[in-house]
Amino acid sequence: MRRRVLLALAGAALAAGCGSLPKPPARQTLYDFGPAPAPGAPAPGADRRSPLSLPEVEADGRLETPALLYRLGYEDAFQLHPYAFARWSAPPTQLVRQRLREVLGHDRAVLDSAAAAAMVRRGADRPPVLRVEVEEFSQVFDSPTASRGVVRLRCTLLQATGSAERAVAQRVFEAERPAPSADAPGGVRGITAAMDAVALDIARWLQQP
């Protein structure tokens, strides 16, 4: 009898502990950002904007893998957790670069490093380079039932000076958007909305004279 009581108490404790974690998907699921946001009205002179070189986006550690990550901010905001059955279709660095190409490409040609080098070999000027580093890309739970997507990118704009590159400007862009549900699908939507907001902010930044 005592053994059955102890087992029941252990099961109840385990259930209570699991209640603080977001509900995982029932099966392995891959996510991406979906369709790009619709372009806004073109800025004056948009048809004359020079090309931009966008090399591979950089990140450290776990952001170089396709894991869909979340933080339990109400318990330990310094620890990243991966969803067991939900993943991005590619590492966040690749998804971020693709979204930036889609958004920035509304009013200019966005080139990879090889295309920029080929343009120079044909006698054109070296285009400015936008280097991007992903610093935060996760779903943050403020409580077991409320979370938000958080994206933070560090952008450095460089201009060619002879054979070297000179830093022209650097800025950190960050956005957070509420997740519609406290699970992986909600996290994906919150992170995607935050990424789209950051991409549009970067586009406006690059349009400044």
Image (cartoon, rainbow, N blue to C red):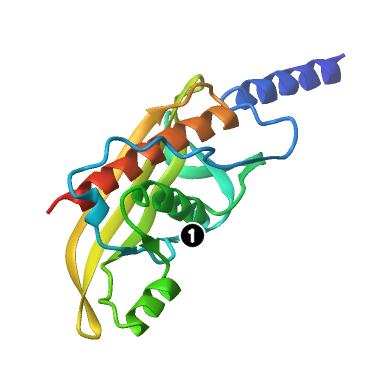
Q: Is residue 208 above or below residue 12?
A: below
Give the residue furthest to the front.
47
For the residue pair 4 and 191, the one nearer the viewer reads as 191
Residue type indicated by callout 1: Gly
The C terminus: image quadrant: bottom left
SS at badge 1:
helix
Spot occupied by residue 206 in the image (x, y as percentages of width and height): 22, 52
For the residue pair 51 and 86, the one nearer the viewer reads as 51
Spot occupied by residue 77 in the image (x, y as percentages of width and height): 41, 38
The N terminus: image quadrant: top right
Residue at point 58%, 32% (across, down): 184
Spot occupied by residue 15 in the image (x, y as percentages of width and height): 68, 22
**Can you identify the residue that label 1 sits on?**
61
Give the residue furthest to the right.
1
Residue 25 falls left or right of residue 94: right
For the residue pair 3 and 64, the one nearer the viewer reads as 64
Q: Quadrant of residue 87?
A: top right
